[in-house]
Image: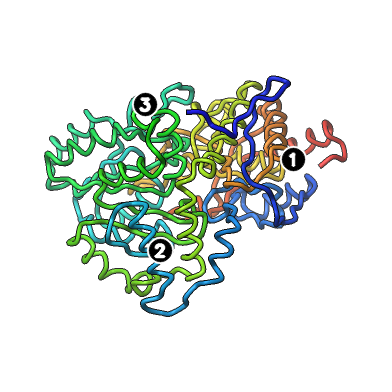
């Protein structure tokens, strides 16, 4: 397969070519370094708590911050705001059936709302949920309902440097061993996440999903597929997997649907709007989940979403079937990863979806994990650049029942790449400032909590530097850059 928006320049460089033009722009602000130091200090060294007015490039997440198309904006004007039975819902429901080949759909306000409903319906005390890798909110909902998460990733998954194309694959031997150990009756479903978020946005292959399906069929175990990062995963299926090369994007989507009993998604990622949903062909599970929708979300035909957003999601899902739309994110990420590799900066390879992932454990090999190196790197990178990234490491875990720290398998600074948002010059700026930071990495120290919430602490916990390393970093920046921002 040839990507027709990867072009070779006369100079010999390969660069991603945007298949869109900017017609609406939003002004950005780049504060000076003293203001950046002040802002991150006030935010408790938690990039989630920064005010966006103090951020130049927001690479915190790809959730709810992707650019809408002109067709999505236009569709929002025809929204039917009836509380019940609206035509807007009918259009979205029909598009869900077309894309996923499933007849039953429940709208929710976002992906974690879907996780809440699925967990309350299917998880009970003693349940064991195998998955290729957990996501923070997924694990929290499962644990809240008495279950435990078992990660059965393949051997390549945690290797920072790898050429393995599908690091999100499930280890089939580990799955079988879990079934033998716990019994199929205690495993209500296997969760497969498209583009494993916490280990670098790494995809899962269609072949692996089919093998998982065979094992689950043998024991009567359901498969729940998290499609939030499906569009990136579809791109990698098409580009990297032999059996998918001659399939259309919609055909690959239908093949994934055939494997799944339940598909849920965050439309803040899949669909480039704000909402979510659950779809299935299992009537028994549908009716059980439907009872919870009015309790936690809203009526059955809006589920907590704005009807304008629902119209945008309908168009966004249709556009997700267009290769020239879904390849923008992965190709810009790959460009950034390759540029950082040239400068010797440790990054997760092969490039995945969602964003560029910097290996904070190698970047800051002098900072122990109990001092949250990924969080420290996120704070340092903001000081150096005004760019907001996200910690994906030990800080994103939570303590065990005895209060002991849960050490993460990886320490990553995630620099998300919202789709169709940033220009190539902005990506180059991010690479430049990260290169400077790498050359001065020994100045960076660790962090320690001053306010630590019990659950999902990375969202609103506050930390402080364990020394005056941030002041030293500011002084070095001024020495090297003078009055430049």
In this view of the protein, which residue sits in the foreground, 366 or 466? 366
| 198 relative position to 419: left or right | left
Residue at position x 59%, y 50% in the image: 46
* Rendered-image quadrant of the C terminus: top right
| Residue linked to disc 1 | 471
Crowding at mark 2 (Cα within 10 Å: few <14, some 14-19, many 20+): many
**Hey, which quadrant is residue 115 in on the image?**
bottom left
Which label sits on residue 242?
3
Contact flag, marks 2 and 1 (Cβ < 8 Å)? no
Looking at the image, tell me whether mark 3 or mark 2 is earlier in sequence order.
2
Alpha carbon separation for disc pair 1 and 3 = 52 Å
Dividing the picture into quadrants, the one containing residue 216 is: top left
Q: Nearer the viewer, mark 1 or mark 3?
A: 3
Q: How far apart are marks 2 and 1 (CA)?
A: 52 Å
Using the image as rendered, state which of residue 466 and residue 107 is in the foreground: 107
Q: Position of residue 210 (x, y in %)?
A: 25, 36
Rounded to the nearest angstrom, the CA distance separating label 3 from label 2 is 32 Å
Mark 1 crowd level (few <14, some 14–19, many ≥20, 10 Å Cα): some
Identify the residue under disc 2: 92
| Helix, strand or loop at mark 2 | helix
Q: Residue 399 in the image: x percent, y percent?
A: 40, 46
- The mark that comes first in sequence, 1 or 3, is 3
Label 1: state its secondary structure. Answer: helix
Left-right relation of 119 to 393: left
């Amino acid at each position: 397969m040839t990507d027709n928006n990867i072009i070779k320049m006369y100079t010999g460089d390969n660069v991603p070519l945007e298949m869109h033009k900017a017609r609406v722009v939003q002004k950005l602000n780049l504060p000076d370094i003293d203001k950046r130091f002040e802002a991150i200090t006030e935010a408790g060294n938690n990039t989630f708590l920064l005010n966006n007015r103090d951020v130049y490039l927001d690479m915190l997440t790809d959730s709810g911050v992707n650019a809408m198309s002109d067709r999505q904006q236009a569709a929002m004007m025809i929204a039917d705001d009836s509380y019940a039975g609206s035509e807007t819902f009918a259009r979205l429901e029909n598009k869900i059936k077309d894309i996923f080949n499933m007849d039953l759909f429940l709208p929710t306000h976002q992906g974690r709302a879907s996780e809440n409903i699925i967990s309350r319906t299917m998880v009970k005390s003693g349940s064991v949920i195998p998955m290729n890798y957990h996501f923070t909110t997924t694990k929290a909902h499962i644990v809240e309902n008495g279950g435990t998460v078992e990660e059965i990733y393949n051997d390549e998954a945690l290797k920072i440097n790898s050429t393995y194309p599908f690091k999100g694959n499930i280890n089939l031997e580990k799955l079988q061993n879990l079934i033998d150990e716990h019994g199929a009756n205690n495993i209500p479903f296997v969760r497969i996440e498209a583009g494993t978020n916490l280990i670098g946005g790494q995809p899962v292959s269609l072949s692996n999903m089919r093998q998982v399906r065979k094992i689950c069929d043998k024991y009567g175990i359901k498969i729940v597929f998290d499609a939030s990062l499906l569009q990136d995963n579809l791109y990698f299926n098409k580009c990297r997997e032999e059996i998918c090369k001659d399939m259309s994007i919609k055909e690959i989507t239908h093949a994934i649907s055939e494997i799944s009993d339940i598909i849920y998604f965050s439309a803040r990622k899949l669909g480039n709007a704000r909402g979510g949903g659950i779809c299935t062909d299992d009537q028994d599970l549908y009716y059980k989940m439907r009872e919870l929708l009015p309790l936690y979300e809203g009526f059955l035909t809006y589920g907590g979403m704005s009807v304008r957003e629902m119209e945008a999601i309908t168009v966004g899902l249709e556009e997700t079937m267009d290769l020239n739309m879904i390849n923008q994110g992965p190709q810009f990420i790959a460009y950034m990863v390759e540029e950082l590799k040239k400068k010797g900066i440790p990054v997760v390879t092969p490039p995945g979806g969602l964003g560029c992932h910097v290996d904070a454990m190698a970047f800051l090999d002098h900072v122990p994990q109990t001092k949250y190196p990924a969080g420290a790197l996120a704070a340092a990178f903001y000081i150096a650049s005004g760019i907001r990234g996200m910690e994906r490491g030990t800080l994103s875990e939570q303590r065990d029942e005895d209060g002991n720290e849960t050490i993460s398998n990886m320490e990553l600074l995630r620099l998300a790449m919202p789709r169709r948002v940033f220009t190539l010059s902005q990506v180059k700026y991010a690479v430049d400032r990260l290169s400077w930071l790498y050359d001065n990495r020994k100045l960076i120290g660790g962090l320690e909590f001053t306010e630590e919430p019990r659950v999902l602490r990375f969202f609103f916990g506050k930390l402080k530097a364990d020394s005056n390393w941030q002041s030293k970093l500011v002084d070095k920046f001024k020495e090297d850059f003078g009055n430049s921002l």
